[in-house]
Image (tube, rainbow, N blue to C red):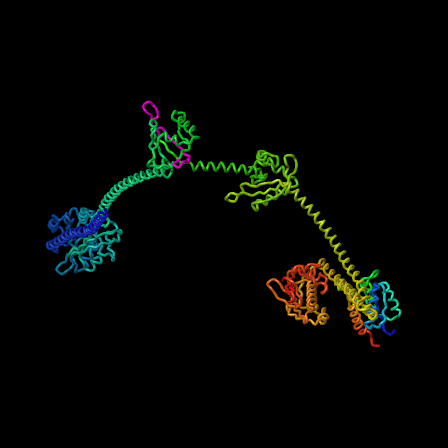
């Protein structure tokens, strides 16, 4: 289903990525998922989008990552003239207020706490699907 | 005496009236006498004239007839003059006024009287009979007189001449002179037709031929028809007040006026009165003097008596109130007579007390015996002129009293040996006590001064503020003797540190403004070192407010200053260390925060893996796994989740440790609402009935802390009521005077209150642990969160009956 725009997942934890993808599966999220392992990889997509490749409907971004961290990615995307419209959702291990605040300050649209419990994880994925994917996908 | 004076006065009054009455009588009498004389003179003159008229034939009334008739008629006229002193001459004149015949004719000047008024009247008035002239000077005699003239007419009534008599007025004057009319009295004969004066005594030239003024009372009375009278008035001629008696001469136009001056009348009275008055005054003075003498004598006696009483009294007082005992000692027998005070002073009964020399010696204090005997013998022998000594005597109650004895020898016997001594005992115990306490006080003062840590001084109130007193401890303090300070005026000023000198002197200005001043400065010690001195000085003023001297103290505070410096340095160092430590701490804190965060983050990641893959296994390979395997996997998941909770709770707990409490108004309702949303799924899954009756709108709390606490409580309530068929959770609030109370009640399993404190401790969980998943950190978080915001948390429970957890938030 190539006509569905991708969901971008930026996370450095392999297991988390894997689990997220599986969670999306079970949640019937059919959008292709583009994965970047770190902030640097994520930012490498920017020229590709600029070149015309389909932009993601939502970017899921882990704040704590090596090399360039999530906040940096938010800042860059949100500073970009055409890419700033892409919703960015922070993935954080806790709702620790300073991180959330920092995320918002840098332009993030929302945040989700990464649950340990996988059931919850699936819930989260469903939420993503319901809200960000379905709601924000223009009718085709 | 008063009666006498009144009587005298009355008598004087009476004699005053009498004097006037006498005057009246006198004047009346005089007037009467004169009038009688005048009357008789005039009558006789008139009669003589009439008689003579008949003897003069008409034909004789011419100059031609003179030779024939002269001798005869002259003689006739002479005869008429016989024994008639008042008339100085009788003359006959012809119709032309020439003299024809006269008595004493040879002496009579041959004057013509045609120009005389009376002649003219005689000639022109056909009805005139007797005419009087005004007063005139008689040519022949040069005396004052008055002419009484009768016209001579023939049978046809033709005027042929006059016959006149010259009445000598000076006779009357002489007569007046004989009368006692006083120096200011007056006798006058006046005409009653024109009120002119004929003759007057005393003679007043201005009065001759002058008439009484119309206002004159006598004139008025005469004009009214009163022929005689007496009246008192002031004369217009000289203003003198007189009593006038007047009497008209019957038949002739004259009246007599006799007057006595009131002053003359009263002169006698006045003299008398003065005499009487003088005598009376003299009498009064005499009596007064006598009385005064009497009074004085009486006074003196009285004063003397009083004085005597007074001195008796004083003596009595002196000897009793003054506490003076008297003794009269017979030196040879040793017996003494004493007054009651002597005995009572020593505490003995005056009635039974008997004094003797021996008794007195016995009562002497042993320590005083020697010097008392010495003084006594000195006096007796004559070495000392006075005997005055102080000693202690034993009193009636066994104690001792200080007595001062003063005595003198008043009699020696025939051989010159002392016989009798009189003396006094004075109780001087009070004085002795005062002296002693004064000595004690001085000693104490000296002691305090010398052992005081501060040096006391007084100094002049003017530069260079030379010291007038310095306590001895100056030497120990600064190595100088007080003497040095006191003898050199500039001593103090010169030893103040030059850099401080100006400030110190200027500061003393403050002393004069406020009356006190404290300052510190460096002062040179005798050994040359500089000592820090604290100097507190007070200005002493006299009662007019003028500065008299200063009083102050100074203290060597070098040690103190050094200590202060040290303290300051230490403080600075401490500050620095605190700063450093704080910085370290902050750094540590930051590290810890980062550490905690990353730890939790990094710890959770693998947990996600464990739980996630286990779940996937369960889901994807359900058909390949038996029930045991599935259970194993479920257990794996539970363990991972448990660890996740623990990590979260630990993170929350440590955050509580590290973050600052932010107290702000918080609406509990909002917090509860948000939390219920969080737990909505659980609440639904457990079919729990949650009622919120909390209605307080604002409390002052740490929002995060409160949220955490409530989250834990609600979570617990849900957790521990899971076995109840109908879980009920209540959230409510109440209020006390000082705090808000929030509580969460459940109807779950409850707990035994004896574990109350334990459950709030960290990691402590009650036995039923496995069944109710929990980390043991939750209530510790609740406890810490509440205590951080100044509140507290506690619980009430009965096993099996649920539990109520309280949060108290102070207002």
Question: From the viewer's perspective, is B278 left or right of B465?
Answer: left
The total of numbered circles placed on residues is 0
Residue B349 shows in the view: yes
Q: Position of residue B29 (x, y in %)?
A: 16, 51
Q: Is residue B478 above or below residue A135?
A: above
**Front residue of A18 and A83:** A18
Quarter of the figure with the C terminus of chain B: bottom right
Q: Position of residue B553 (x, y in %)?
A: 58, 41
Q: Is residue B92 magenta?
A: no
**Front residue of B93 and B621:** B621
The quadrant where residue A134 appears: bottom right
**Front residue of B232 and B409:** B409
Q: Position of residue A45 (x, y in %)?
A: 87, 66
Magenta portion: prevailing SS class: strand
Q: Position of residue B187 (x, y in %)?
A: 20, 50
**Front residue of B600 and B663:** B600
Q: Is residue B50 above or below residue B348?
A: below
The quadrant where residue B464 appears: top right
The quadrant where residue B448 appears: top right
Q: Pick out the residue farthest to the bottom.
A: A140
Question: From the viewer's perspective, is B744 left or right of B67?
Answer: right
Task: Give the magenta part as a residue range.
Answer: B395-421
Residue B140 shows in the view: no
Q: Is residue B571 above or below residue B765?
A: above
Q: Is residue B400 magenta?
A: yes
């Amino acid at each position: 289903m190539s006509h569905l725009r991708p969901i971008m997942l930026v996370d450095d934890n392999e297991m988390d990525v894997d689990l997220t993808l599986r969670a999306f599966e079970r949640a019937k999220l059919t959008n292709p998922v583009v994965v970047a392992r770190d902030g640097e990889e994520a930012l490498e997509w920017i020229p590709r989008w600029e070149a015309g490749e389909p932009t993601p409907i939502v970017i899921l971004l882990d704040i704590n990552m090596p090399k360039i961290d999530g906040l940096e990615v938010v800042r860059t995307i949100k500073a970009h003239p055409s890419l700033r419209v892409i919703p960015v959702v922070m993935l954080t291990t806790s709702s620790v207020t300073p991180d959330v605040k920092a995320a918002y300050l840098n332009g993030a649209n929302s945040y989700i706490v990464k649950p340990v419990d996988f059931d919850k994880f699936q819930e989260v994925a469903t939420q993503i699907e319901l809200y960000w994917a379905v709601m924000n996908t223009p009718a085709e | 005496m008063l009666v006498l004076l009144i009587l005298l006065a009355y008598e004087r009054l009476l004699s005053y009236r009498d004097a006037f009455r006498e005057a009246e009588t006198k004047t009346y009498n005089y007037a009467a006498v004169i009038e009688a004389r005048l009357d008789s003179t005039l009558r006789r003159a008139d009669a003589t004239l009439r008689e003579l008229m008949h003897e003069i034939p008409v034909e004789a009334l011419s100059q031609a007839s003179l030779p024939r008739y002269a001798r005869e008629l002259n003689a006739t006229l002479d005869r008429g003059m016989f024994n008639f002193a008042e008339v100085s001459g009788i003359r006959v004149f012809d119709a032309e006024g020439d003299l024809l015949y006269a008595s004493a004719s040879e002496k009579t000047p041959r004057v013509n009287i045609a120009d005389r008024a009376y002649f003219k009247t005689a000639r022109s008035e056909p009805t005139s009979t007797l005419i009087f002239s005004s007063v005139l000077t008689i040519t022949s005699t040069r005396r004052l007189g008055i002419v009484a003239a009768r016209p001579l007419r023939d049978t046809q009534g033709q005027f042929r001449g006059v016959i006149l008599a010259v009445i000598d007025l000076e006779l009357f004057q002489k007569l007046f002179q004989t009368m006692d009319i006083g120096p200011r009295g007056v006798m006058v004969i006046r005409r009653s037709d024109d009120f002119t004066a004929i003759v007057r005594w005393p003679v007043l030239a201005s009065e001759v031929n002058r008439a009484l003024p119309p206002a004159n009372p006598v004139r008025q009375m005469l004009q009214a028809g009163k022929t005689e009278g007496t009246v008192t008035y002031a004369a217009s001629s000289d203003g003198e007040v007189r009593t006038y008696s007047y009497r008209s001469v019957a038949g002739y136009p004259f009246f007599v006026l006799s007057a006595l001056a009131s002053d003359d009348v009263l002169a006698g009275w006045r003299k008398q009165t003065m005499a009487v008055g003088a005598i009376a005054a003299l009498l009064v003075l005499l009596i007064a003097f006598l009385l005064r003498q009497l009074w004085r004598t009486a006074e003196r006696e009285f004063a003397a008596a009083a004085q005597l009483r007074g001195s008796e009294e004083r003596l009595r007082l002196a000897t009793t109130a003054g506490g003076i005992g008297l003794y009269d000692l017979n030196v040879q027998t040793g017996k003494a007579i004493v007054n009651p005070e002597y005995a009572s002073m020593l505490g003995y009964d005056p009635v039974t007390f008997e004094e003797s020399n021996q008794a007195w010696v016995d009562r002497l204090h042993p320590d005083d015996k020697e010097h008392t005997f010495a003084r006594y013998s000195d006096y007796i022998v004559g070495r000392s002129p006075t005997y005055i000594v102080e000693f202690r005597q034993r009193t009636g109650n066994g104690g001792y009293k200080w007595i001062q004895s003063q005595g003198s020898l008043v009699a020696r016997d025939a051989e010159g040996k002392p016989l009798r001594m009189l003396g006094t005992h004075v109780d001087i115990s009070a004085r002795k006590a005062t002296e002693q306490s004064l000595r004690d006080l001085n000693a104490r003062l000296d002691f305090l001064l010398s052992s005081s840590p501060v040096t006391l001084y007084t100094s002049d109130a003017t530069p260079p503020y030379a010291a007038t007193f310095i306590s001895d401890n100056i030497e120990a303090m600064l190595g100088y003797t007080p003497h040095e300070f006191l003898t050199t005026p500039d001593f103090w000023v010169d030893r103040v540190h030059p850099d401080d000198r100006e400030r110190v002197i200027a500061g003393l200005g403050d002393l004069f403004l406020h009356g006190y001043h404290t300052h510190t400065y460096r002062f040179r010690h005798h050994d040359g070192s500089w000592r820090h001195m604290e100097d507190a000085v007070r200005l002493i003023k006299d009662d007019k407010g003028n500065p008299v001297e200063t009083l102050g103290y100074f203290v060597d505070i070098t040690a103190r200053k050094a200590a202060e410096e040290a303290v300051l340095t230490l403080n600075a160092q401490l500050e620095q260390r605190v700063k450093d430590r704080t910085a370290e701490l902050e750094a540590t804190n930051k590290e810890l925060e980062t550490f905690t965060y990353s730890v939790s983050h990094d710890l959770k990641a693998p947990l996600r893996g464990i739980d996630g893959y286990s779940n996937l296994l369960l889901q994807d390979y359900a058909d390949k796994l038996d029930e045991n395997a599935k259970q194993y996997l479920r257990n794996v998941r539970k363990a991972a989740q448990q660890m996740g909770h623990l990590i979260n709770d630990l993170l929350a707990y440590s955050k509580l440790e590290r973050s600052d409490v932010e107290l702000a108004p918080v609406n509990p309702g909002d917090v509860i609402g948000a939390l219920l949303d969080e737990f909505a799924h659980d609440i639904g899954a457990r079919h729990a009935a949650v009622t919120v009756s909390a209605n307080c709108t604002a409390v002052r709390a740490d929002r995060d802390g409160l949220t955490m606490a409530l989250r834990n409580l609600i979570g617990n309530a849900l957790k521990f009521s899971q076995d109840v068929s109908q879980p009920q959770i209540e959230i409510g609030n109440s209020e006390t005077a000082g705090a808000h109370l929030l509580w969460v009640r459940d109807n779950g399993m409850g707990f035994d209150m004896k574990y109350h404190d334990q459950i709030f401790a960290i990691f402590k969980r009650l036995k039923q642990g496995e069944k109710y998943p929990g980390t043991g950190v939750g209530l510790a978080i609740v406890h810490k969160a509440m205590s951080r915001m100044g509140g507290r948390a506690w619980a009430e429970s009965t096993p099996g009956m649920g539990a109520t957890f309280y949060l108290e938030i102070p207002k």
